[in-house]
């Protein structure tokens, strides 16, 4: 064999080897995605937000794998997906998401999964959604009504959604034990009912003239509707943290707070409190800024690592902030 022929054979061998390695890497990547969504050959459920992820895990128990895309302490309005996470959505048996515009960078991936045949459930759209008014491009004259995605601040709505998630799991996830799913959902619904009772009793300590809320953006409309509070306004006059207030927005809000005698602003723990601090400066330093876990659970052991603990922590903080205790 000539030296030229040997070199040609060597090049062919190297090309085949590279092709084989590329094929193996593709198989490993596919197996990784499948394993993330369907560990141990169990059916897979993918949930976008960590609040809904906690609720779904309470319902599903050990019957299926539940993958939660949003990390602790993240902002649901701005978090995005990796390529692997986007692939997980299209490999799932069921996708549970909030909807109503909450997961602004993720909804297109949910839509892609739906178009590929994956069953999806929009929890917020099934929770009798409320609306809130937000200023349009024309200022107050251009106010528009938008759906409020933050339904979980009302535990009664979460209790309704609990039953609906159980229905979807039983209908779309093969191999789960329907009796176990129903038993889990009933047990958790009882805990949610107890939470509502406890919140009613706790908020009963807040006098009528102090039952007014100001937050860093519109997030507590459902809680206000359920427990008899007034929403005076928000630092960011929008349902998303991605918007920004104008100087006229801040001036209108400070004037409304002064008229209502409000001296407490609630800021979400997943966002910097800079905007709420601005109000403190605008109103002469007499405004308290109270941090709440309103849009994201924390890591384990950090105060709000489950939905139930988050709601109890928020209720306690709100009562303390509004009563001055």
Image: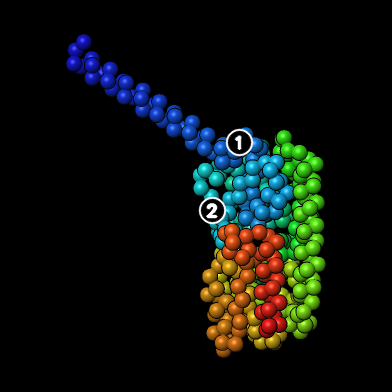
In the rendered image, the vertical position of residue 195 relative to residue 181, given as above or below: below
First in residue order: circle 1 vs circle 2: 1
Image coords of residue 282 (percent x, y): 56, 85
Taking 112 as reference, is 222 left or right?
Answer: right
Q: Which residue is at the far bottom?
A: 284
Left or right, 169 with respect to 139, comes to: right
**Nearer-the-camera pick, 251 or 212:** 212
Nearest the camera: 208 or 308? 308
Instruction: Locate residue 104: give its quadrant.
Output: bottom right
**Mark 2, other Cα within 10 Å: few <14 / some 14–19 / many ≥20:** some
* Element assignment for label 1: helix
Residue located 36% across and 25% down the image:
17
Specify the quadrant that holds the N terminus.
top left
In the picture, the quarter occupied by the C terminus is bottom right
In the rendered image, the residue lying farthest to the top is: 1
The part of the image, by quadrant, that contains residue 281 is bottom right
Number of the front mark, 1 or 2: 1
Q: Residue furthest left?
A: 3
Q: CA distance from mark 1 to mark 2?
A: 27 Å
Please give the name of the residue rendered at 61% of the width and 50% of the height, measured from the top-left corner: 68
Indicate the position of residue 242 as horizontal and vertical percent values: 56, 64
Residue at horizontal 61%, vertical 46%? Answer: 67
Residue 223 drawn at (x, y percent): 74, 68
Decide which of 104, 85 is in the foreground and name it.
Answer: 85
Residue depicted at 78% across the width and 65% down the height:
196
Task: Name the residue carrying label 2.
Answer: 80
Q: Position of residue 197 (x, y in %)?
A: 81, 67
Marks 1 & 2, CB-CB < 8 Å contact: no
The quadrant where residue 161 appears: bottom right
Q: Looking at this view, name the residue that lies furthest to the front.
A: 301
Q: Which residue is mark 1?
A: 40
């Amino acid at each position: 064999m000539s030296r030229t022929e040997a070199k040609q054979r060597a090049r062919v061998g190297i090309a085949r080897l590279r092709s084989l390695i590329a094929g193996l890497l593709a198989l490993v990547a596919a197996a990784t995605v499948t394993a993330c969504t369907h560990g141990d050959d169990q059916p897979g459920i993918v949930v976008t937000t960590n609040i809904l992820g906690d609720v779904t895990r309470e319902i599903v128990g050990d019957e299926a794998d539940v993958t939660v895309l949003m990390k602790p302490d993240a902002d649901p309005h701005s978090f995005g997906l990796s390529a692997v996470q986007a692939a997980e959505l299209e490999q799932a048996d069921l996708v549970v998401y909030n909807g109503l515009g909450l997961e602004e960078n993720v909804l297109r991936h949910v839509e892609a999964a739906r178009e590929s045949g994956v069953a999806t459930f929009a929890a917020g759209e099934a929770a009798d959604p409320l609306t809130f008014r937000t200023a349009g491009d024309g200022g107050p004259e251009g106010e528009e009504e938008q759906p409020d995605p933050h339904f979980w601040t009302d535990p009664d709505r979460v209790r309704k959604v609990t039953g609906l998630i159980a229905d979807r799991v039983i209908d779309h996830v093969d191999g789960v034990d329907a009796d176990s799913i129903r038993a889990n959902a009933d047990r958790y619904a009882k805990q949610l009912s107890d939470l509502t009772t406890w919140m009613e009793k706790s908020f009963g300590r807040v006098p009528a003239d102090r039952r007014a809320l100001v937050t860093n953006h519109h997030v507590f409309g459902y809680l206000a509707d359920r427990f008899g509070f007034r929403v005076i306004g928000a630092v960011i006059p929008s349902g998303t943290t991605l918007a920004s207030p104008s100087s006229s927005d801040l001036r209108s809000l400070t004037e409304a707070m002064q008229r209502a005698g409000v001296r407490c602003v609630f800021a979400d723990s997943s966002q910097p409190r800079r905007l709420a601090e601005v109000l403190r400066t605008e109103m002469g330093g007499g405004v308290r800024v109270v941090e709440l876990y309103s849009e994201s659970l924390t890591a384990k052991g950090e105060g709000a690592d489950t939905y139930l603990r988050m709601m109890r922590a928020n209720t306690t903080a709100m009562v303390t902030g509004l009563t001055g205790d």
